[in-house]
Image (cartoon, rainbow, N blue to C red):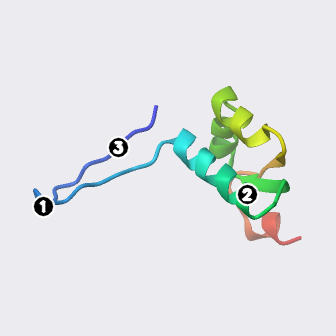
Amino acid sequence: SDVLLFQESSPLEVQLAPTGRELVQALRGLLLQAHWHTFTLLVDPASSTALRRPELWTTLTAQPLHPTLITLSSPLRAQSLFR
C-alpha cells in the first residue's frame, strides 16, 4: 500500500516513486554485486514491520544473502547508533 503524493507540477514533469518491493530488489542487486552476502540492517520500527512482510523479507533472505535485522528504539537517539 504505497502512497504517492502529487504536487502541482509542469505538464512536462513526470514524478516516479519506487515501491517497497522495487527498493528491496535494488538493494538485493547492490548487495550481490558488492559480494556483501552477510549484512545488518538498522531500521526504525515502521521499516522493520514493513521489511518483515513475506514478499520483502523473502527477497532479502534468498540465497546467498544472510541479513540480520535490528529494530532501533523509538524515538531514535544518537546513542542507539553509536555505542
Q: Which mark is residue 4?
A: 3
- The crowding category of the residue bearing disc 1, from other C-alpha atoms within 10 Å (few below 14, some 14 to 19, many at least 20), is few
> What type is the residue that disc 1 sits on?
Ser
Query: Upstream in the sequence, badge 2 or badge 3?
Result: 3
Q: Which numbered mark, 1 or 3, is in the foreground of this view?
A: 1
Q: Quadrant of the C terminus?
A: bottom right
* Of residues 41 and 16, the one drawn nearer to the viewer in this rendering: 16
Q: Which numbered mark, 2 or 3, is in the foreground of this view?
A: 2
Q: Residue at left 66%, top 53%?
A: 29
Q: Which mark is residue 31?
A: 2
Query: Upstream in the sequence, badge 1 or badge 3?
Result: 3
Residue 70 at what x, y percent from top left? 81, 49
Residue underneath mark 1: 10
* Of residues 67 and 6, the one drawn nearer to the viewer in this rendering: 67
Q: Which mark is residue 77?
A: none
- Secondary structure, mark 2, is helix
Left or right position of 22 against 79: left
Q: Which numbered mark, 1 or 2, is in the foreground of this view?
A: 2
* Of residues 51 and 29, the one drawn nearer to the viewer in this rendering: 29
> What type is the residue that disc 3 sits on?
Leu
- Secondary structure, mark 1, is loop
- The crowding category of the residue bearing disc 2, from other C-alpha atoms within 10 Å (few below 14, some 14 to 19, many at least 20), is some
